[in-house]
Amino acid sequence: CCPVYLGGSSSPYGIGTNVSKRTCDQLRCTACDFRVSLFNDYIWDQSCDYLFFRNNMPELSKLRAKMIKKKGARAYACQCSWRSIDGLTDLQTDQQLRWVCGKH
């Protein structure tokens, strides 16, 4: 993917390009070396913190405690970072995330 896009649940998955703006579903974090999990129609609760993800990734049953249903959104998380996204977003606009395409 180049550029790498994140997006809400209405954004299609696939290889992202400047022409075909698709969200990457093969994301990997270069900081914690975890695969980024994504959950359609959810956002993260504001009380989420680093320790919550560090202790609970990738167990969905534990993560659900801080997931809020929101149609059209998508919740992303690895073991050290998390985001709730509504619309198509270029990953380069968020300098704090260390996520890259893990190849399709």
Image (cartoon, rainbow, N blue to C red):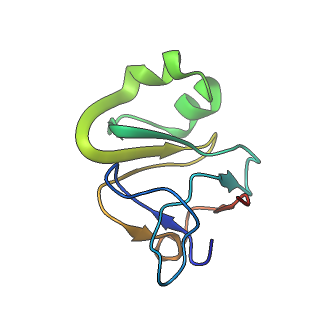
Seen from the viewer's position, the closer of residues 79 and 101 is: 101
Image x and y of residue 83, in percent:
44, 51
**x 72%, y 57%: residue:** 102
Q: Is residue 67 found left or right of 30 in the rendered image?
A: left
Image height check: is 2 above or below 84? below
**x 48%, y 46%: residue:** 76
Image height check: is 42 above or below 21? above
Seen from the viewer's position, the closer of residues 74 and 13 is: 13
Picture quadrant where residue 51 is located: top right
**x 64%, y 39%: residue:** 79
Image height check: is 19 above or below 48? below
Image x and y of residue 15, in percent:
58, 66
Check the picture and name the quadrant holding the N terminus: bottom right
Image x and y of residue 42, in percent:
33, 37
Specify the farthest residue to the left.
71
**x 42%, y 35%: residue:** 48
Image x and y of residue 92, in percent:
53, 76
Image height check: is 25 above or below 100? above
